Image (cartoon, helix red, strand yellow):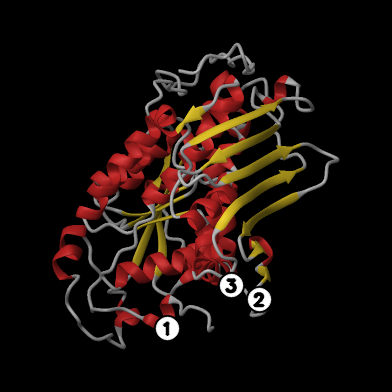
Amino acid sequence: MKREKNSKETGSSRRDFIKTTSAAAAVSTLNIPTLAGAWATGSDEIRVGVIGCGGRGTGAIGNVLDSAPGVRIVAMGDAFKDRLTDSVTNLKKKYADKINVPEDRQFVGFDAYKKVIGTSDVNYIILASPPAFRPEHLRTAVAAGKNIFTEKPVGVDGNGIRLVLSLVEESKAKGLAIAAGTQRRHQTGYIETLKRIKEGAIGEVVAARAYWNQGGLWNKARQTSWSDMEWQIRNWLYFTWLSGDHIVEQHVHNIDVINWTMGTHPVKAYGMGGRQQRTDPAYGHIYDHFAIDYEYENGVHMSSYCRQIVNTDSSVSEALIGTKGSCQVNKYVITGANPWRFTEKDNNPYVQEHTDLIASIRAGKPINELKTVAESTLTAIMGRMSAYTGKTVTWEQALNSKDVLAPATLDWGPLAVPAVAIPGQTPLV
C-alpha cells in the first residue's frame, strides 16, 4: 500500500486560512477547490505559539516547520529565560526565515502560557512543558479557540485527566483540531500493521505485551542559586507531580499502542515496582522499574514492563498474541496463519503528526485525538497507582481519585520532595 499523502500533496481547501474556530465550523462543509497562489500570499499560514522550549519543545518546532509549507513560529514561552533564549538562537540557525519571535513575543515564567495563547496572531499551539501543566494549558488553549498539538502525557493524576476529558466535546464543538504526541498513530509501519490486526490477520487477540526498558536518562546537577522549585522543574523527570513517573511520561507510548489495538482502555491494573538503582536524592522520588498486569473488559491481559536502569538489556516494543498467530508490532511482523512483513520505507512520525494535523485544519475536517491520549495517560496512571500502593486499581478509582499531585501554589520558593512510595503503606486515595 502506498504511503499516506502529506499536506503538500493534499493542499488547501480554500483561499483564506480560518482565523477562528467558529468560522472553521461554519465553512467546513464547503467544497472550494485548491488555489494555486495560496502559499505565495500566506493566506493559509499556520502561525505557531510554543509553550515549553526544552529539548522536546525545540524538537517539536523543527518537526512542525518540516511538516508543511506556510508555517511560521511567532510566539514562544518557557518557565526559564535561558532555555527560551537557547531555543530561539539555535532554531534561527536552521530556520531563520521561519522564526519570527521578537523579544515582545518571548514570554518567561509560570504565566508564559497565557501570554503565548493570548497572542492574537497565533492559530496553532504546541504544548511541550512538563506534563503536570498540560491540563491547565489545554483548558486555556481550548477556551481561546486555538488548534493544538499537545505532547503526551496529558496529565499526571485523575484530577487532571478529568479536566482533559471534559475538554473533548467542547473542543469538538468549537471545531478545533487537536493532535497528540503519540506519534506511532501517524507512523506508516504501525498503521499498516495494526490495520491487518484489526482485519483479523492473527485472529482474536488474546494477550498483549508492552515494554519500555532502557538505561538511565539525563540529570541536571543542582546549582546553589536554584530554589527547590527550580531544581525540581529543571529535573522534572524525577518528580511524580511533574512527570507522573516514567511509566506515565515515557511508557505511555507502548501502552497507547495496545489501547489502539484493543479499541478501548483496560478496566483494572495490578502491579508492582520500586526504586533499586536510582536511590540518590538527585533522582527525586520516582521508581526506576514497574511491572503491571492490565486487564481489559473482554478478559485480555497486557503485560506491561518499564524500567530506567543502567547496564540492563533494552526493549522498547509491543507484541500481540492471537488465536491464529502473533505480531511483533514494533517490528511490523506477523507470523502464523497469515504471515506478513512491512517492507516499504517508513515515514518520520514526529513530522507526520504535524502534517496530518495541519492538513485537517486546512481541509476543514479537524482531527481530534484528545480522548485517546487522555485514556492512554490514565491507563499509565492507573498502573502507577497500583505499583505505589500494592493494590488492585480499577479504571473508576483512577479516574475519580482525589489525589492532586501538584503543589497548591506555584512559586520559586521551598518545595519538599515527597517520600518514595512504599506498597502496603502508601494509601490509595
Q: Which mark is residue 347?
A: 3
Q: What residue type is labelled 2?
A: Trp
> Is label 2 in a helix, a strand or a loop?
strand
- Viewer-proximal residue, 408 or 5? 5
Quadrant assignment, res 307: top right
10 Å neighbourhood of mark 1: few (<14), some, or many (≥20)? few
Mark sitting earlier along the chain (2/3): 2
State the image coordinates of residue 76 (x, y, percent, origin top left): 43, 49
State the image coordinates of residue 223 (x, y, percent, origin top left): 68, 24
Residue found 39% across the figure and 58% down from its top: 48
Quadrant assignment, res 309: top right
Residue corresponding to mark 2: 340
Q: Tell me the quadrant of the picture where the C terminus can be found.
A: top left
Residue extending farthest to the left is: 26
Residue extending farthest to the bottom is: 36
* Front: mark 3 or 1: 3
Q: Is residue 47 above or below residue 39?
A: above
Quadrant assignment, res 294: top right
Mark sitting earlier along the chain (1/2): 1
State the image coordinates of residue 382 (x, y, percent, origin top left): 51, 33
Residue extending farthest to the right is: 311
Residue found 45% across the figure and 37% down from its top: 155
State the image coordinates of residue 241 (x, y, percent, origin top left): 51, 26
Mark sitting earlier along the chain (3/1): 1
Residue corresponding to mark 1: 9
Q: Which amino acid does label 1 sit on?
A: Glu
Q: What residue type is labelled 3?
A: Asn
